[in-house]
Image: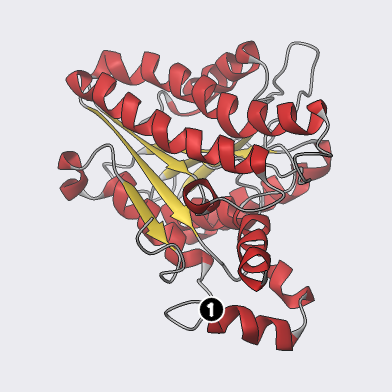
């Protein structure tokens, strides 16, 4: 039972609790809230990276990691209420030496995703790397789970990844190069009571990545997946210290993961030349909790 609690907390910490795409206008996408500005520290060969759900949490850590490496980052955020956080993330990236803009969109609407990519191209000319990070949880036992709970998680965590991947492929296939990194979860590998919807969606993302890797390989596009485990975020501060000690004892490395460690793996998959020959694989950043999955 304690293991179930551990994995449940993993899921809560590894994703945002709200959809990283929300309609701003009837047709789906707002204008960028912050204009880009080229900085001297931006790399000459900077990649344009779209990170969904990146105004806070793991998405923000990923965006900052890429930004401080001199990349151009598109911050996708949740709703009007997240606009300030998205703008702040943009400024952090610029201060760290990268460049960024923030764009709002709705993952459940394919037309909205098309507009998200159109505005991304308008801002930076292209999109070189897609990081599918956005996700939500709506937990409940199967016998009590409402259709709306099931569908909302599938729409965001699985269909949203598909729509973004589809839109990205249309850009990348013309250039015959590109990288996709999907953020899944160990719950998609080992399951968890009360999260049938989440486990199904995250497991589906892993399967989709392998299918896409085979399908896209002829166009020079790689597709890989990262599965975070129990990651230390601001949410951990709210947990009881004794409970955290018990959780940590169940992790082979005997400590929580750091957002920067997940972000580092994403940076490697997104930017390192070695990853030109890595596709269709899943990389766990979990301290060993899902070892053997």
Does residue 201 sit above or below 111 in this rendering?
Answer: below
- Image quadrant holding the N terminus, namely bottom right
User: How was the colour assigned to the protein in this rendering?
Assistant: secondary structure
Q: How many marks?
A: 1
x and y percentages locating residue 281 in the rendered image: 29, 43
Q: Which residue occupies the extreme front position in the image?
A: 143
Left or right of 49 in this view: 218: left
The 10 Å Cα crowd at callout 1, few under 14, some 14 to 19, many 20 or more, is some
- Image quadrant holding the C terminus, namely bottom left
Does residue 280 sit above or below 193 in this rendering?
Answer: above
x and y percentages locating residue 291 in the rendered image: 38, 64
Q: Secondary structure at mark 1?
A: loop
Kindly tell me whether residue 160 is visible in this rendering: yes
Q: Nearer the viewer, residue 41 or 11?
A: 11
x and y percentages locating residue 206 in the rendered image: 42, 38
Question: What residue is pinned by disc 1?
Answer: 250
Query: Residue sitting at 78 percent across and 33 percent down?
Result: 149
Query: Residue sitting at 39 percent across and 61 percent down?
Result: 264
Q: Nearer the viewer, residue 203 or 271?
A: 203
Does residue 286 sit above or below 69 in this rendering?
Answer: below
Q: Nearer the viewer, residue 272 or 11?
A: 11
Q: Hey, which quadrant is residue 12 in on the image?
A: bottom right
């Amino acid at each position: 039972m304690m293991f179930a609690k551990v994995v449940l907390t993993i899921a809560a910490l590894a994703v945002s609790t709200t959809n990283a795409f929300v309609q701003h206008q009837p047709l789906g996408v707002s204008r960028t809230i912050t204009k880009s500005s080229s900085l001297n520290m931006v790399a000459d060969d900077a990649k344009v990276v779209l990170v969904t759900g990146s105004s806070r949490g793991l998405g923000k850590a990923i965006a900052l990691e890429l930004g401080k490496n001199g990349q151009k980052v598109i911050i996708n955020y949740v709703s009007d209420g997240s606009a300030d956080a998205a703008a702040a993330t943009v400024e952090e990236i610029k201060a760290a030496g990268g460049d960024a803009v923030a764009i709002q969109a709705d993952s459940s609407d394919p037309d909205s995703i098309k507009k998200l990519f159109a505005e991304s191209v308008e801002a930076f000319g292209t999109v070189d790397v897609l990081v599918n990070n956005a996700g939500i949880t709506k937990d409940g036992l199967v016998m009590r789970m409402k259709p709306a709970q099931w569908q909302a998680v599938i729409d965001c965590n699985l269909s949203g990844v598909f729509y973004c991947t589809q839109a990205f492929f249309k850009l990348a296939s013309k250039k015959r190069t590109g990288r996709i990194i999907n953020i899944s979860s160990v719950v998609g590998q080992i399951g968890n009571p009360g999260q049938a919807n989440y486990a199904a969606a995250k497991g589906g993302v892993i399967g989709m990545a392998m299918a896409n890797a085979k399908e896209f390989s002829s166009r020079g596009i790689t597709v890989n997946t990262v599965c975070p485990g129990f990651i230390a975020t601001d949410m951990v501060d709210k947990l009881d210290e004794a409970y955290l000690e018990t959780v940590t004892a169940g992790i082979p490395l005997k400590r929580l993961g750091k957002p920067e460690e997940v972000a580092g793996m994403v940076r490697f998959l997104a930017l390192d030349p070695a990853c030109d020959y890595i596709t269709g694989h899943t990389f766990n950043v979990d301290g060993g909790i899902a070892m053997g999955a």
